Image (cartoon, grey):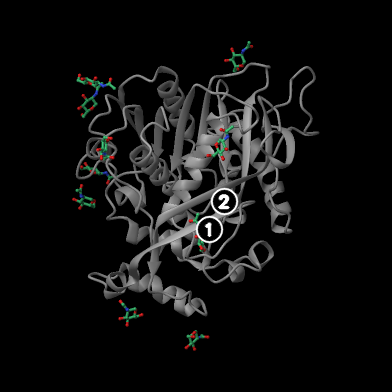
Amino acid sequence: MRCSILAFAGGLAAQSLQLAAGQSAQFLSSNPGGAIPAMVQAPSTSGFMQSTIQPSRGGLSVCVSGIVPVQVSTAMNMAFNFSVPDNQTGVTQTFLSMISSASPFVQQLMAGTQSVNGTYNIGGTLCTPANNTTPKTVEILTHGIGFDRLATQRLSHLPKFSFAVDLTIRSFFYDRLGVGQSSKPDALTIQSPLELEILQSLITKLKNGTLSNITPTTIVGTGHSYGSSLVQGITSKYPSSLNTAILTGFSVNSTGSSAFVAALNLAIASQNQPLRFSGLSNGYLVSSTSISNQLAFLHAQNFDPNVLSLAEATKGSVTFGELFTLSAVVAPAANFTGSVAVVNGDSDLPFCTGNCSYPTNLAQAAITMLYPKTNVTGTYVAPLTGHGINFHYSAVAAYHYIQDFIAKGTSSNSTST
Ligand SMILES: *[C@@H]1O[C@H](CO)[C@@H](O)[C@H](O)[C@H]1NC(C)=O
Ligand SMILES: *[C@@H]1O[C@H](CO)[C@@H](O)[C@H](O)[C@H]1NC(C)=O
Ligand SMILES: *[C@@H]1O[C@H](CO)[C@@H](O)[C@H](O)[C@H]1NC(C)=O
Ligand SMILES: *[C@@H]1O[C@H](CO)[C@@H](O)[C@H](O)[C@H]1NC(C)=O
Ligand SMILES: *[C@@H]1O[C@H](CO)[C@@H](O)[C@H](O)[C@H]1NC(C)=O
Ligand SMILES: *[C@@H]1O[C@H](CO)[C@@H](O)[C@H](O)[C@H]1NC(C)=O
Ligand SMILES: *[C@@H]1O[C@H](CO)[C@@H](O)[C@H](O)[C@H]1NC(C)=O
Ligand SMILES: *[C@@H]1O[C@H](CO)[C@@H](O)[C@H](O)[C@H]1NC(C)=O
Ligand SMILES: *[C@@H]1O[C@H](CO)[C@@H](O)[C@H](O)[C@H]1NC(C)=O
Ligand SMILES: *[C@@H]1O[C@H](CO)[C@@H](O)[C@H](O)[C@H]1NC(C)=O
């Protein structure tokens, strides 16, 4: 196991160099040659603009990638009493003001709600097992802050297996608004209420055959961190949308969020990474350094240092609009009757202040508070693992737990040893 991880790390370093040279990670990293295996039927490109077809890394799935236009509106975006700062000094002071106790900044920030509508381009990838089967389950994955849709593939320790490309079901993963190949509108407009409607629209398109002509019977919504908050918001606002919700890096305890915001040490993206983010306004931010990323996402020694380097080289942006509305869509899902699992690293910083079993099992507490009518629930706590579960060696066992939960759809409580 160790051996293959180390061998794999060489590939990561090479990719990291390519990215440092300004080449964006537009496509899935794939087999050398990148060809679809003979006799394997390629997925339909229907519903995708600028579509391309590739195997997943390791070749066990075949994928269509491209741009999916979504037309959405919300009356629930926030209006802010805030202008994007002119410079880094102002950005840094904003976060100091935000995390200060009894902060007047936070009290004065919210200025009611604002309606937003638009058509946005969303970068997405749909993968299906590379053996001409047509699984009836599709999993839609929503990434968190600091990453993009391909981070899980790129940063997984597992050359032939990843969270994002399950072997027995279809998976659709997409760049959230403002990230990767997706549209980059005004940074204050990119907020959780708008992103929730984008996720709902993508789910509808997956269900009604718009994307790749598939007609799944079961939809699983999986998120990480802020992505989990959006998935949770779907189960509350649109309770019949998903059959199963998998919330990773998630709880209802926000005590650690200040430490997380401070740990990220947010920098203006266009200044911190000019080769990747020139042209974006000062409202688009990134974590400063790999030290910020370790603080926010990782638990030593349970990760490969090369993964941290690559996470830094490929880090994704976040906006003020998102940081001001992080949990605005999270609400009890009294009408959700599907199954739900919460999967955390035991040392998660933002959602557990570094200890997910203090003062109680915070994964179970989230289910108890948010899912009063859900009978089929599960929790899993990965050992010696930070917020970025995917980037630790322990991700393997967490993936297995998630796959079993999806497959069985049955109740299970599990804490690994
Ligand atoms: C940053 O912007 C503020 C407000 O525009 C200005 O007063 C200040 O001088 C600027 N600081 C630097 C270091 O440029
Ligand atoms: C808006 O914020 C400024 C500080 O930046 C504050 O002086 C002003 O009172 C706020 N306005 C409202 C309506 O809260
Ligand atoms: C969309 O927003 C514009 C303002 O940006 C507004 O004029 C228009 O009525 C809105 N349309 C819908 C369908 O909400
Ligand atoms: C297709 O591949 C998946 C994953 O390896 C496997 O579970 C399934 O049984 C395969 N189906 C066929 C018909 O080979
Ligand atoms: C599928 O859902 C999308 C998003 O709501 C919608 O725009 C589209 O018209 C629907 N297509 C069909 C065939 O129902
Ligand atoms: C949230 O976490 C903090 C820090 O661990 C703890 O002090 C607090 O009691 C927790 N709140 C709840 C409701 O669990
Ligand atoms: C659940 O559904 C009922 C009936 O449609 C509705 O009145 C209620 O507001 C819903 N509850 C939530 C939390 O959405
Ligand atoms: C959940 O359990 C309750 C009590 O056992 C039962 O009445 C309800 O029908 C169950 N709901 C679902 C969705 O299975
Ligand atoms: C987490 O909190 C529990 C008490 O709930 C404590 O026993 C345990 O040592 C803590 N773990 C760490 C790593 O601090
Ligand atoms: C899971 O744990 C919760 C809280 O400890 C408990 O209420 C629930 O009954 C457990 N479910 C199963 C299937 O053991």
Q: Residues within 10 Å of mark 2 (few under 14, many from 20)?
A: many
Residue drawn 38% across the image and 58% down it: 325
Residue at the (33%, 49%) spot, across then down? 351
Q: Return the x and y of residue 373 as percentages of the image width and height.
A: 24, 29
Can you see residue 28?
no
> Three-letter amino acid code at disc 1?
Ser
Q: Which mark is residue 290?
A: 1
Residue 217's place in the image compared with 331, above or below, is: above
Q: Which residue is mark 2?
A: 311
Q: Is residue 129 left or right of residue 244?
A: right
Mark 2 touches mark 1? (CB < 8 Å): yes
The one of 316 and 213 positioned closer to us in this rendering: 213
Instruction: Please tell me in which quarter of the rendered image ligand 5 is found.
Output: top right
Please tell me how crowded label 1 is: few (under 14), some (14-19), or many (20+) other residues with Cα within 10 Å.
some
Where disc 1 sits, the SS reads helix
| Residue 12 percent location from the top left of the image | 66, 44
In the rendered image, the quadrant that contains the N terminus is top right
- Depth check, mark 2 against mark 1: the one in front is 2
Residue type for callout 2: Ala
The C terminus appears in which quarter of the rendering?
top left
| Residue 392 % position (x, y) | 48, 40
In the rendered image, the vertical position of residue 363 relative to residue 170, given as above or below? below
Instruction: Work out whether 178 lies above or below 83.
Output: above
Q: Residue at x 71, y 33 (%)?
A: 45
